[in-house]
Amino acid sequence: MITVRVNQIILSIAAALFFLFVKPLPLLTQSQPLNKNSSKETESPLRPETPETMIEAIRQRNEDIDKKSEALKVKEQRLQIMAQEISSMIKKHTQILEDISQQKAQKKSKMALEQEERYRRISKIYEKMPPEDAATRIDKMKESLALNLLRVIKPKSVAQILIGLSPTKAAKLSEKLSRKPR
C-alpha cells in the first residue's frame, strides 16, 4: 500500500516536471488546421526559434522603443511649454498683486492724509473757541478722537484745554499724547 502511494507521488512529480520544461503546444481552434505549415502563425512571440525571427523580434522591439521615445520627447516638449506658460502666469499674477498692494498703500496713505486734514480743520475750530468750551466738548468725546484732535491743536491751546478738563482725564490724555501715535 505504501509503495502504491509512493509510485503515485513519483508519477505526479514527473508529470509536473514534464509540463514545466517542455514547450506547451498552442491551443488549436476549429479555424486552425493541424499541419506543420502553420507553425509560423502559432509561434510564441516570447521564444523565437530561428535567427530571422529573432532579428525580426529585435527590430520590432527597437521600433517600439523608438516610438515610445518619440512620444516621450513630445510629452517633454509639451511639459516644457506648459511650464513656461505657468511661469509667465505666475509672473503676471505676482505683478498684479504688487500693483494691488501699491494701490492699497496709496489709498491708505491718501485716506490718512484726508483724515489728518479733517482733524486740522476741526482743530482750528477748537483753537478759536474759549478753552473752557473746548475742554467741555473734548471731555465728552471718545478718547481716540480727542487724542487725534489734541495732537494737531497748537500746544498753547492744548495746555489751556487740559487745564479745563478734570485732573484724571487731563493726566490720562497727557500720558497718551506723550506716546508715539499709531
Image: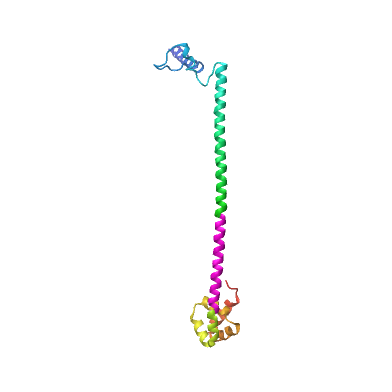
Residue range corresponding to the magenta coloring: 94-120
- Residue at image location 54% in from the left, 34% down from the top: 71
* Residue name at image x 53 percent, y 83 percent: 125
Magenta region's main secondary structure?
Answer: helix
Q: Which of 123 and 172 is in front in this view?
A: 123
Which is more toward the observer, 180 or 111?
Answer: 111
**Is residue 59 shown left or right of residue 33?**
right
Q: Quadrant of residue 30?
A: top left
| Residue 108, horizontal then vertical, whole percent | 54, 67
Total count of labels: 0
Magenta region includes residue 178? no
Where is residue 98 shown, x and y percent of the image?
57, 59
Classify 135 as above or below 85.
Answer: below
On screen, residue 179 versus residue 44, left or right, reads right
In the picture, which quadrant includes the C terminus? bottom right
* Residue 19 image point, x, y percent: 48, 16
Q: Which residue is drawn at 54% across and 54% down?
A: 93
Q: Which of 36 and 85 is in front in this view?
A: 85
Question: For this rendering, which residue is in front, 166 or 103?
Answer: 103
Q: In which quarter of the image is residue 54?
A: top right
